[in-house]
Amino acid sequence: MTVALDLRRVGHAYFGQSVLKGIDLSIAPGEVVALVGPSGSGKSTVAQIAAGLTDAREGRVARNYARHAMVFQEPRLLPWATARQNIRFALRRSGLPRREWAARVARAAALAEFDAADLGKYPVELSGGMRQRVAIARALVVEPDFVFFDEPFTALDVALKRRMQDLVIAASREARFAALFITHDVTEAIRIAHRIAVLDLRGRGIAGTRTLPGEPGTREENFCFILRQRYLAEDPLFRHIHDVDERRRP
Amino acid sequence: MTAAFLKDRADRLLHFLWSGWAGVAALALLAAAWQAGHERWGGFILPDPLETLRTAWALALSPDAQAVLWLTGGRALSGFALASAAGVLIGIAAGYAPAVMRLARPLLTVILGVPPIAWIVLAMMWFGTNGTTVAVVILISATPVVFVSAAEAIATRDRGLDDMAEVFGHGLFARFWHVDLRQAAAPLFPALALALGTAFKVAVMAEMLANAGGIGGALARARAMLDVPEALAWVLLAVVALLVVEYGLIRPFQGEVERWRRAAQPWGVKR
């Protein structure tokens, strides 16, 4: 089986304290995997290592794709650049000829449902949701094979969060990219992913995975709700998702 | 695109010029206080503002005085350029490397603790009474403020933007050029304006003490002749020269680099 991203026995430590150990995770091309886990379990560190932003202290990361992108929890837009320039920023190292940038930016903005009339505005003139749309457009503009989402919608209100999830589902179906979607929201994971991987409470490996029935975007709201309730109430894999006070962790 | 570009610049220029009314009002208040002082203490102690303006205007039109202005202006600018380059370069290095910062901080404390006048005396003994003395004293006096600001700007930059740029394939130099340097610009411009002011002040002081000509030399001559109107006129011309450089060079550059900040201001406050 072809693998887009493969993590083998990955481990990491901060200031001598081990935060991740023995992480094994493979993601196939076009597959969206949601990595869920309690707050402070090391989900974002897994994404950072997988994306190459942090070097793993142990283990191996194999990236078998041509180009990746990332959407962070905060939009991380350049405040001095307009929305158009922010999206274009991702193209600087893409090797795409400059004459094609404008069309590519327009297409990415449309995919992220960002109004073209607002492309000339600075981030400070945009709402939180619009900024996150720009961040998504910036990720999509490079036409990535793999996208890392690091809790991108945590700061948004419920309605906007659902709109953004729909946007990611539509974009992943259209652009056919694989993705690692970090979240602590089980409903979000069920809506967006093909498969859910649950990180161990203390980052000691992937505790288990659940393959979701059907395709993202085709699941009924009621189905997502019932599945979430079942996971949280009956599935031991999800037992510790919400019951950890990270400040008490050693 | 070009029309929008020109419209934006013209818009900002007109807003800037319109904001000059506040400055004119402040200057009018200063002139009123000056006039009151003149009427209280008499023309020998404090000549009236109009007489000073007339003297300054006459000096500005005289080729000899223009040469004096150019000499001081050139010295101040070259010292400022040296101090800015040194401060920015060492400051950026210190911002990235905590070890450099730890080494540089005590040195800065020592340098800042020495009054500029002591540096002038030392530089006069080392380099003689010439332009080099002026440039060296400006370099020593103006570099620390630029250094501290550049170092702090780099050390406290938003590293999240660095990560974002790295994800999209930007290497070390590209991240420095497109992300870190732009972030450092915000605290750097006020420091550069302060360094420019220091450069002019120190240039005049060093010229006066080192007898190296320029506005400082002219002030020393006016003092010897007890010519208060001419002394005040030279002070006025030095201030005007500083303002010309600051508003003709630094502020337009700052306005261009930081034009996004205008967008952040609510309507009605932009002036």
Image: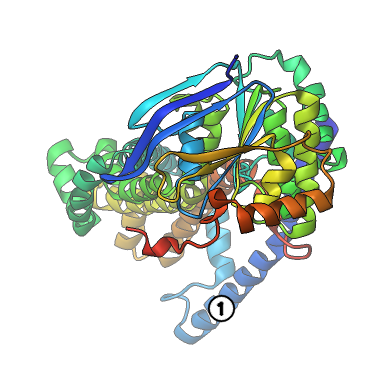
| Residue B159 x %, y % | 47, 43
Q: Horizontal placement of B35 versus B265: left or right?
A: left
| Residue B228 x %, y % | 41, 66
Q: Count residues near mark 1 (Cα–Cα under 10 Å), then give few for <14, some for 14-19, many for 20+.
A: some
Which of A72 and B22 lies nearest the eye of the viewer? A72
Residue, disc 1? B35
Which of B214 and B84 lies nearest the eye of the viewer? B84
Instruction: Evaluate whether residue A130 shows in this view.
Output: yes
Secondary structure state at the residue bearing disc 1: helix
Q: Horizontal placement of B107 versus B185: left or right?
A: left
Quadrant for residue A175, please give it.
top right
Image quadrant occupied by the C terminus of chain A: bottom left
Q: Amino acid at mark 1?
A: Gln
Quadrant for residue B10, please give it.
top right
Please count the marks in the image: 1
Q: Residue at x 77, y 17 (%)?
A: A100
Task: Report in which chain the residue with disc 1 lies.
Answer: B
Q: Horizontal placement of B60 versus A179: left or right?
A: left
Which of A64 and B92 lies nearest the eye of the viewer? A64
| Residue B58 x %, y % | 55, 52
